[in-house]
Each structure stands twice: as structure tokens, then as C-alpha cells.
Image: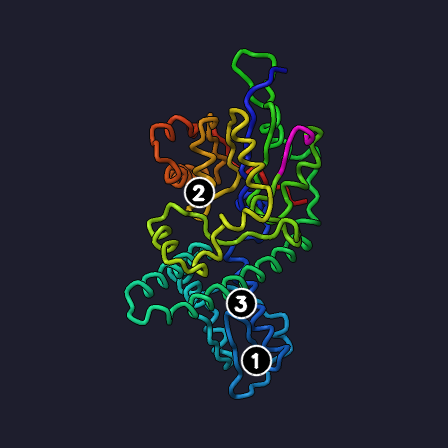
Amino acid sequence: MEEVRSKLVIIGNGFDLAHDFKTSYNDFMLWYLSNCIRGCVKDFGNYEDKLITISNPKNIRLSTTDLTYSLLNIQDFNDDLGSRLLVPKPSKFLEKLIQTHKKYNWVDIENAYYESVVSYYNNIKHNSSSMDWVPELRKLNEQFECLRDKLEEYLMEVQEGTINKFKPSVEGKINIILEEIFSKIIQENSTYKKIPKKVFFLNFNYTDTIEKFLKLTPRRHASELIYIHGKLSNEENPVIFGFGDETDEYYEKIENLKINDFLNNFKSFWYFKTDNYQKLLNFICEQPYDIEILGHSCGLSDRVLLSTIFQHDNCESIKIHYHAKSETKNDFFSKTQEISRHFRDKAKMRRLIVNFRNCDSMNYFSLIS
């Protein structure tokens, strides 16, 4: 077999979602808000954390069935509490998340956090009593970090309850993508296959789904896997949760305030806790590589990292494994729009992105057994 360029495989949350794992922010928020109501039952009608206080002012006796309560829709949270005569007092940040979901039927916690940080910046720049906003900013950071801890708790439940019980067949459809990544670049009128020099899996997920899959392939010795945003319950590789677009118009202005609280949850500073980022840089600097994207949204919350990967001189192509919503609808077009935001050189972007005809759907991941 002939050896060709290395591959950089970007794994995002869509990879877990394609296997029907409940790892979206919406799933998490439903779990969290349901837990808040169940907490009222356990604590005799009162619940409190950094994000919300729920009280039972009339001392209504709650049913023991509420111990298994599960919210069906984030938008119904306040109504459900009202029906139980419970009074919620959410923080401004949690209320923002709930209202954003009501408006768009989805929520991006990291982007919502950054929008809140920018609003505090504007308050400090344009308010005569500017430093009064610093305590509010610190509260926001505490609330965001509380939500990060809750997210890790939730994903641990998902991983232990679903992902760890997931037994993909070695002979099953997972081999489609593994063979695609490890060996398949079949030329027309050719009887041999080309194999990549090295396969580097860049996992943005906190869960270990891809790691379990890689253990099934005999070619795993030819690959490297890093959890760029940390791994669940791992002190040596802690969860990184925050915002990563240092090219945003507000970032330099925020940095120039010289108030470090503004920078607490920017991903760049958390990357220094491990050598994962350096391993990635070493890989992209050492050899030409092709990129394959499996389930990553390519949004702005990872802009600096993705821009570094996409625009590097060694990057030769970007292949999208898209999500097919139906036979005629998929997210390939919108994914190319997201990717374009990471390029200053649009001509290079158009050269690198593999055309739709030569890309694959992720919908063959219906592997639950």
C-alpha cells in the first residue's frame, strides 16, 4: 500500500448525537432544570444553587411522584413551577438561557456567556459607576462555572448509563467510517489502496465514545487521540468550557481593561493546563494533512483553534461528514458557511473544502445495539 498525507479527524458533539446519545445543551438544560424541581421535593420545597433559587412560600405539600419529575420542554419550566405553586428566582444568566431557548428553540451556553461578558464590558465603559459591575461579573463567572460542573455531572451520567453500555459490533457499520479514515482513498482504475501516514483524532467531546470505537480497529496503533477540551472526571485533563474567539472585535477591548475576571473562562488560558494544544501544533507543523470533520459545528466558540488548523500551510483539504435531515435536506451548506468564518483567505477556503459529491453523510451511525 502506498503512503499518503496524514489525516486530522475532528470529532464534535454531533458524533455523539448521531448515535442517539443525549449530549446536547438542550438535553443538559432539561436535566438540570428537572433536577432543580426534584431538589425542591428533597429539601421540603426549597432549592438553591449559584444559578437559581426555588421556594415554596405557601408550604404546599409536594407529591412524592415529583421525585421522578422530568421536564419535557425548557420553555415550560416556569409554567410547570407555577402549576406546583413554586416560585423560581433564576439568575440573569439562567434567565437569558431560558429566554434564548424560547426564541430560537435551542441554546449555545458558551456563546450566551460571552454575550453576557460583552454586556458587562459595555456597562463598565459607559457607566459612571463602572467598577460597580465587577462584582456582577464575578457572579456571572460563578454561575457559568456552576453550570460547567453540572454539565460534567450530567455527561458522566450519560456516559455511565448509555455510552458505556453501547456495544458496537466490530463487524457493524462503524467499520465504514474507520475504514474511510484509516485506509480508503481508492483511485479510479486502481487496484490498490492508499493509507494515511498518520491519523490524529482531535476530540472536542468530553465523552469517550470515539476512544471506545478506536479500540475496535486493529489500526489503532497508527493513530493518536487527544481530548482537546478535557475528559470527564480527569484531574490531569480537566474539562475546558468557555469561549475561544480572540479575534472578536470586543476581545482586545476587554483585555485592555486589565480586569482579569473578564478572561477567566476564555479557552486559551485553560489550554495551558495540559500539553494537548502543543501536541496538536506539533502534528500540523510536521507534515501535510487532510481534515475530516465528524460532528463538529465549526462555530465561533472555537474560532482561534479552528482557524489555526484550517489556515495552516500544511492543510490540504477539508472533508465534511454532514448530517442528513432527510433525503433532500442536510447541513452541508450551513457547515461550509461556518467554516468560511475561520478563513481570511477565501480563495484558499474554496480550494480546500471537498465538494458535496465527494463527502459522506453521518447518518450511517444508527448503531445502537
Which SS class for mark 3?
A: helix
Q: Determine the image quadrant of residue 123.
A: bottom left
Question: Does 322 sit left or right of 116 as displayed?
Answer: right
Q: Which contiguous range is marked in magenta?
A: 220-225
Looking at the picture, which amino acid does disc 2 mark?
Answer: Val
Image height of 112 relative to 183, above or below: below
The mark that comes first in sequence, 1 or 3, is 3
Question: Does 261 sit left or right of 345 as displayed?
Answer: right
- Residue under numbered circle 3: 33
Which SS class for mark 1?
A: loop
Q: Determine the image quadrant of residue 298.
A: top left
Could you tell me which residue is drawn at 54 percent across and 50 percent down?
270
Find residue 226 and report its horizontal and vertical position in percent: 61, 40
Looking at the picture, which amino acid does disc 3 mark?
Answer: Leu
Real-space CA distance between mark 3 and mark 2, rounded to the nearest whole angstrom: 32 Å
Could you tell me which residue is drawn at 37 percent across and 40 percent down?
341
* Mark linked to residue 304: 2
Q: Residues within 10 Å of mark 2 (few under 14, many from 20)?
A: some
- Residue under numbered circle 1: 46
Find residue 273 and report its horizontal and vertical position in percent: 58, 49
Real-space CA distance between mark 1 and mark 3, rounded to the nearest whole angstrom: 14 Å
Image height of 172 relative to 186, above or below: below
The mark that comes first in sequence, 1 or 2, is 1
Looking at the picture, which amino acid does disc 1 mark?
Answer: Asn
Find residue 352 and report its horizontal and vertical position in percent: 42, 27
Find residue 59 and report its horizontal and vertical position in percent: 56, 87
Q: Nearer the viewer, residue 340 or 40?
A: 340
Could you tell me which residue is drawn at 43 percent across and 59 percent down?
262
Could you tell me which residue is drawn at 66 percent across and 41 percent down?
211
* Mark linked to residue 247: none
Residue closest to the far front: 258
